[in-house]
Amino acid sequence: MIRVPRRLSRRGLIGVAAFGLSACASGIQNVEPVDVPRLEQAVAASPDDTDLQVQLGVAQFKAGNADQARVTLAAAIEAGNESGPAYLYLGMAEEEMEDWSAARTAYNRYLDVGASAAGREEVRKRLTLIGRNLLRAQAQQALAQEQEITATGQIAPQSVAVLPLGFNSARDDLEPLIYALSDMMITDFKVSNALTVLERAQIQVLLDEMALTSAGYADAETGARAGRLLRAEHVFQGVLTTLGGDDLQTDADILNVPSASSAGELTAEAALEALFDMEKENVIRTIREVLGVELTPAEEQAILDNRMSNVLAFLAYGRGLRQLDLGNYAAAQAEFETMMSLDPGAYQGAADAMAEASALVDASNTSTTGLGSIAAGGGEFGGFFGPPAAPVTEDLSSLGIGPRSPVGAGASSGDGSTISGVTSTLTGVIHSIDPPLTATTIDQGSAGQSRNPTPEQTQVTGRDPAQEALGQENIPGTAQALIRIIIRRPGGDQ
Amino acid sequence: MIRVVRACAAALGLLAVLTLPAMAQSAMVGTGVDYLGYSFDEGLGAEAAQLFVVPVAVRFPVGEKVTFDLFSAWADGRIEQGGNTYTLSGPVDTSVKVSYLATPWAQVGLSVSIPTGDGTHNTQEALVASVLSTDLLGFRESTWGTGLAITSSVGVARQMGGFGVGLAAAYAMRGEFEPSDGVDLTYQPGNEARFRFGLDRNFDNSTLTLGVSLISYQEDRVTDDVAADRNLFQAGNRIRFDASYAFRAGAGVWTLYAADLLRENGDLRVDIVDETNTPVDSTFVQTASQNLIVGGVIGTVGLGGGFVFRPHVDYKYQTREEADGADAGSGWIMAAGGDIPMRLFGADFFPKARVYFGSIRSLSGEDVGLLGMEFKGTIRVSF
């Protein structure tokens, strides 16, 4: 039993007050749009406090002003603030402004300094999505600067770009092979450390931006143009043809981009079930015969082992890749799941694509606001204590008070939000006689300023019937009992 | 039967909590600790009383018009009397309320008080309950359970001239419960009807609200070894007048409020029985009338860095008058303190402390001093 001391010492009261004031220790707190005016004043008063600048940037972003937020946050970082919230919200602001490169830089920095594991995980997924957006932006930039790029003629030595094969067949069900084959070939070319192999996504995005059709990939001039834009030394391009039944043929041309001439041509035939053998033959012969690069026995074996055991799985993989390129991430993920069910041991490239699709699905389903909430929920913001959200008291107009507010307008609903018109009056009268019991616990932020005194303040709590009937709710410690008057009959038991 | 209902109710409450995430966005959950304790000078009987409550409150909107509120708590009440400490603890009744804003000017509500708390007390627990139910002391829980109750409410409001005008009514149907452990007695509180008329108006930079409420009760009934379902107690009507005035002072908002809660005397029926416990007649004993006046102020004082201190000072003055003119239980309490709202790991945190002092009149007519402390720490999380 805790006894309240009869005399509260001055030292004790000072201790309580000190405890309360120690709550003012600063940190980067999560803030809301309503905090913007307060933070603007605070930043103006303390221009060297970069934590305040970061909070202002966060509040500006939440208020929908991404452009202003990135200026504020970049300035805070420039001034030395290396906090997770600064980089996270700068990344989000840059993302909103579609500056993918800047967003990627900020997010990558956040991965180093962010405190929220959930936030970092979400940012990793987001970087995948941003990577795709960045590739598209780079492709658009390359096309815009095509003349300059062509004039400079810069290429990466021993670099190879594998274009999707053209498809020459009435068998539409086999068309996904061209995407799967190009992906597998890229994986195989990468086995040799002597080559620099461009990523499939990078190539595909450029081709999509060039609005090339699959029929145009085999065109030498188109391939050369793509090669120049990609700064690749060689471009592998060709056509996949069905020969009747399930027989396939590939006709490939390895283009030397600087000379704009063919470095070699390859033709291979195989039945559908021997598809991977045909692909391996193309890759190994290209490396050795056309590019003049030696393969060690181990490298050659790695290439030969890199295959699927199931053609149907390979087709599902090709469909998934195409859906990925089209931005249909959920459909891509579904195709990859089909692939995995048909061939659980699918090769490494397939596993990477599966992970990419999963990340893209998650990232595309999460807004920047959602990302902020995830990071906040994971403890990105903090310090031990921080100031409250502004609705607590700061803005009188949010309480329906002030010349701008008509009667009943904008009064506090009790939860910090605002409600309009007569609804505030309505809420006040209803809560006076039928209050939700949650009010005392939840409405801390504005209970003191609501239109009507709270039941707690004015002592209108529920009736305590049994105590009242017995008259026991008046004086502590004078419990009484139910009265019963017994009248004995004259001469009863005596 | 009561246990079955209680178990079902608890399961319903738990189910509601578990299904919250799927049902709502921007829901709010509040919990914390709430302590209020008093020490009394000699003369009252009790030497100290305290209540420790851990409330759990959940609010989740469904769409823009429907809001669910769920509240329950675990409470521990203790009193010290004659050197002994008596305890009453456990979960309290659970309240579930759904509010529907039919139009911007009309709202209906339905709330159910589910008997998850144990309202059946032994002698020692009843002693604790009686102390905690002292109106003037303002404990937020005193009974732990009063049976099932269903309350429906409706309110309308509109603007008239420069005023917001609101009317509301509520009706509460009360279920029976067994207040005494070891005594075969079932208590059926009377149903309640409540009415409210409210006004509000802005004056430049401030807002004034006025209101009056009336609460009326049907008779409480009991079933015991004397007779089944007989009238026991007619609670007196309550009338509450209240007013508040909110205005800006500097950077903060201040609110002055006052209320007067009048309670008419009640009539307790006392049986006259013969030696075989058979009622032969009855008479009535009038319980005290009561008037409780509350006045207070809540404000905001900037502390810098976005922090504010919200002082909260109030004064309660209560008069009671028995039929014979005795005024035991009258008294006053002054409370002062405040809170400093803050963010704590992304949640809203409201630490509050207040000091209480005052006096209460004993049966012998002596004013007995009291001193109290209140500590609250409430955390609110939004989803």
Image (cartoon, coloured by chain):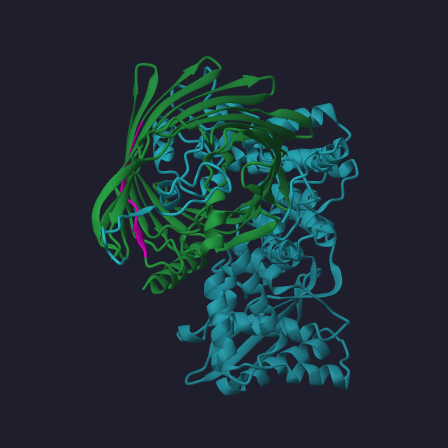
Chain colours: A cyan, B green
Q: Residue at x 74, y 33 (%)?
A: A9
Most foreground residue, B268 or A408: B268
Q: Residue furthest top?
A: B204
A17 w.r.t. B11: above or below:
above
B79 w.r.t. A339: above or below:
above
Q: Which residues are magenta?
A: B185-196
The percent coordinates of residue B378 (x first, y second) are 57, 43
The percent coordinates of residue B28 (x first, y second) are 49, 46
Q: Residue furthest left?
A: B280
Q: Residue at x 70, y 54 (%)?
A: A111
Q: Is residue A296 left or right of residue B27?
A: right
User: Chief secondary structure of the magenta span?
Assistant: strand
B381 w.r.t. A417: above or below:
below
Most foreground residue, B291 or B90: B291
Residue A263 is drawn in which quadrant?
bottom right
Residue A137 in view here:
no
Residue B192 counted in the magenta span:
yes
Residue A353 is drawn in which quadrant?
bottom right
Q: Is residue B13 left or right of residue A139?
A: left
Most foreground residue, B312 or B175: B175
The percent coordinates of residue A148 (x first, y second) are 68, 46
